[in-house]
Image (cartoon, rainbow, N blue to C red):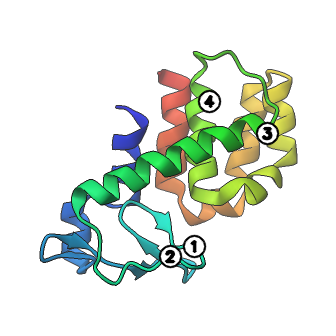
């Protein structure tokens, strides 16, 4: 499954959001995420100055998701982990940065150090010993399985 489809599942498919009332009348509408932040579409954190009073069509939500993933990929470079391009850890980091942002991802110092040294078992242990894991265990376990099993 590609990263866009993974994020649609993780952040809530259109059908799932329809059940919660975030997708109605053919559009996505702003909602509060688990930490109380305004969010819209497939996990887009509403930034200062952004207004979505008309909601988002499916196409607009998908375009916003693609832009957010591009931004997350740029941020992953700033982590300076230098993994091989084909490494599944690259997608893991993109998903992590997408969900947590660059600042919070940079706080995973032991995790990042383990990745840089190629100690993937320690990296997994560091992820599992985090608030992020405790808050979204199903998502993180799925991401770990993808890295381990490919």
Residue at image position (68%, 15%) is: 84
Task: Residue at 38% x, 42% y: name it.
Answer: 4
- Report which quarter residue 15 is drawn in: bottom left
**Pointer 2 and pointer 1: residues touching (CB < 8 Å)?**
yes
Instruction: Give the side of residue 47 with respect to residue 62, left or right.
Output: right
Residue neighbourhood size for the residue with mark 1, other residues' Cα within 10 Å, grouped as few (<14), some (14–19), many (≥20): few
CB under 8 Å between discs 1 and 4 = no
Mark in front: 4 vs 2 = 2
The mark found on residue 47 in the picture is 1
Residue 120 falls in image quadrant: top right
1 and 3 marks in contact (CB < 8 Å): no
The residue that label 2 is drawn on is 50
**Residue 142, above or below 43:** above
Which of the labelled discs sits on residue 79, or is there none?
A: 3
Say what secondary structure mark 3 lies in: loop
Nearest to N terminus: mark 4 or mark 3: 3
Quickly name the residue at label 4: 90
**Does residue 10 lie above or below 31 as drawn?**
above
The residue lying at 44 percent from left, 80 percent from top is 51
CA distance for labels 4 and 3:
11 Å
In the rendering, at what x and y percent does residue 39 appear?
46, 73
Pinpoint residue 91: horizontal percent, then vertical percent: 55, 33
Q: What is the x, y in percent for residue 121?
A: 73, 29
Work out whether residue 103 or residue 68 is closer to the camera in this orientation and state it: 68
Dot 3 alpha-carbon crowd within 10 angstroms: few under 14, some 14 to 19, many 20 or more = some
Lower sequence index among marks 1 and 4: 1
- Crowding near pointer 4: few (<14 within 10 Å), some, many (20+)? some
Q: Give the CA separation, mark 1 to mark 4.
A: 25 Å
Q: CA distance from mark 1 to mark 3?
A: 22 Å
């Amino acid at each position: 499954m590609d990263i866009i489809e993974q994020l649609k599942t993780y952040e809530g498919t259109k059908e799932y959001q329809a059940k919660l009332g975030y997708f109605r009348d053919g559009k996505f509408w702003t909602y509060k995420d688990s930490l109380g932040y305004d969010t819209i579409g497939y996990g887009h954190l509403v930034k200062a100055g952004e207004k979505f009073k008309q909601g988002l069509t499916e196409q607009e939500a998908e375009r916003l998701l693609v832009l957010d993933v591009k931004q997350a990929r740029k941020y992953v470079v700033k982590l300076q982990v230098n993994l091989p391009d084909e490494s599944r850890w690259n997608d893991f980091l993109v998903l992590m940065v997408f969900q947590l942002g660059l600042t919070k991802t940079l706080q995973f110092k032991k995790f990042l150090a383990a990745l840089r040294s190629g100690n993937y078992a320690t990296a997994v242990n560091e992820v599992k010993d985090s608030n992020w894991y405790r808050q979204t265990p199903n998502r993180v376990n799925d991401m770990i399985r993808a890295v381990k099993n490919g």
